[in-house]
Image (cartoon, helix red, strand yellow):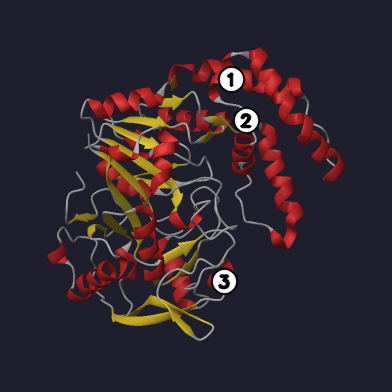
Amino acid sequence: MPALVLLGAQWGDEGKGKATDLLGGSVDYVVRYQGGNNAGHTVVVGDQKYALHLLPSGILSPTCTPVIGNGVVVDPSVLLSELSGLNERGVDTSKLLISGNAHIITPYNVTVDKVTERFLGKRKIGTTGRGIGPTYADKINRVGIRVQDLYDESILTQKVEAALDVKNQILTKLYNRRAIAVDQVVEELVGYAEKLAPYVADTVLVLNQALEDDKVVLFEGGQGTLLDIDHGTYPFVTSSNPTAGGACTGAGVGPTKISRVIGILKAYTTRVGAGPFPTELFDEDGDALRRIGGERGVTTGRDRRCGWFDAVIARYATRVNGLTDFFLTKLDVLTGWEQIPVCVAYEIDGRRVEELPYSQSDFHHAKPVYETLPGWSEDITKAKSFSDLPKNAQNYVKALEEMSGAPISAIGVGPGRDETIEINSFL
């Protein structure tokens, strides 16, 4: 029962879509287990580029069954639009399965998200404004709407009424907004029921049966380790658990069934949104990384903050996820630098700290301690094996591997599906 978890080992945007797609032809199921359409994956197939937000990357593989697990929050309008866009491009989406226990992002969740973020002003978190946080809050507060509720209008109406009892008070009295009508929300949500019906399933049962039948199941995290609600740079985090443990709760599969955990690492570091970022660059190097790497958020359209590789974060990701392997992406972006700094530790109040501080205040004040590695100028996009890489590029990869605490089993040397060096098989 080979079950693999594939997740971001930094702040997201590491290239998980490319890694998942690479494995897609070898696995039977690809499962999104958390997050919503606040995540974005770019997958390049031939000369075609696909921007996926809510759908698992495996939907581009004809031999794979893509699954949206119970831990995901689903905006029906976004999902149907994404499916329609893929269908128009000739992608077969009929095999998609959606958990009946996944929670629905309602129109009022989106409204609350946007007005709350604006209200916070300078204290804003930097959310995508897509209703993700409020939907997870409703889930925890037990006033959430699940996919299965769309098929019982009476229950749906009662749940929407319960949710809006409080939210309308907040919208009208705190934010000076108009109240949201229950019947309007119910009408919109019921309108999605028939279109979603062919995809809705008991995905927990399906996935566990698949593993019992020795099928290969890949669990795909939506964001990075440092955005995890429990283990990330709180409060500048997402509202769910993209770390490896989230795969178990977000898909209904026990931890003893997970065989490998693969962390995706960018050869440098990026972040979207607010929050501490020790290696962030505000100079020409940062601009060059952003330009050469095409560092713009797939979902948000925002420029990503860019910085040098942070080995402290990589070690932390190895520890909290139990990583067995790394997939290093975008090594080609670093071509052309004579010297490449790598953060090996932090300086905090005059002390050298080699592990991620648990204190939010300490991390906020952390200054990077760099070691500089020699760069390379040769084009590496045509490299097919590790030995094809320039010696300095090989040494850079080996140094990152030693610092990060897990073997680098694959390297991305370009954006294309075939521009990957596989050192060790993930299967």
> How many discs appear?
3
Mark seen at residue 62: none
User: Identity of the amino acid at label 1?
Assistant: Asp
Query: Mark 3 sits on what residue?
Result: 364
Question: Does residue 403 show up?
Answer: yes
Query: How far is the residue under mark 2 from the one under mark 3?
Result: 34 Å
Label 1 CA crowd tier, 10 Å (few <14, some 14–19, many 20+):
many
Q: Position of residue 276 (x, y in %)?
A: 55, 67
- Which type of secondary structure does the marked residue at label 2 adopt? loop
- Which type of secondary structure does the marked residue at label 1 adopt? helix
User: Identity of the amino acid at label 3?
Assistant: His
Given residues 161 and 308, the one toward you in this image is 161
**Upstream in sequence: badge 1 or badge 3:** 1
Query: Mark 1 sits on what residue?
Result: 149
Given residues 366 and 142, the one toward you in this image is 142
Q: Position of residue 255 (x, y in %)?
A: 34, 40
Question: Does residue 47 show up?
Answer: no
User: Identity of the amino acid at label 2?
Assistant: Gly
Q: Position of residue 332 (x, y in %)?
A: 30, 65
Label 3 CA crowd tier, 10 Å (few <14, some 14–19, many 20+):
some
Query: Mark 2 sits on what residue?
Result: 144
**Upstream in sequence: badge 2 or badge 1:** 2
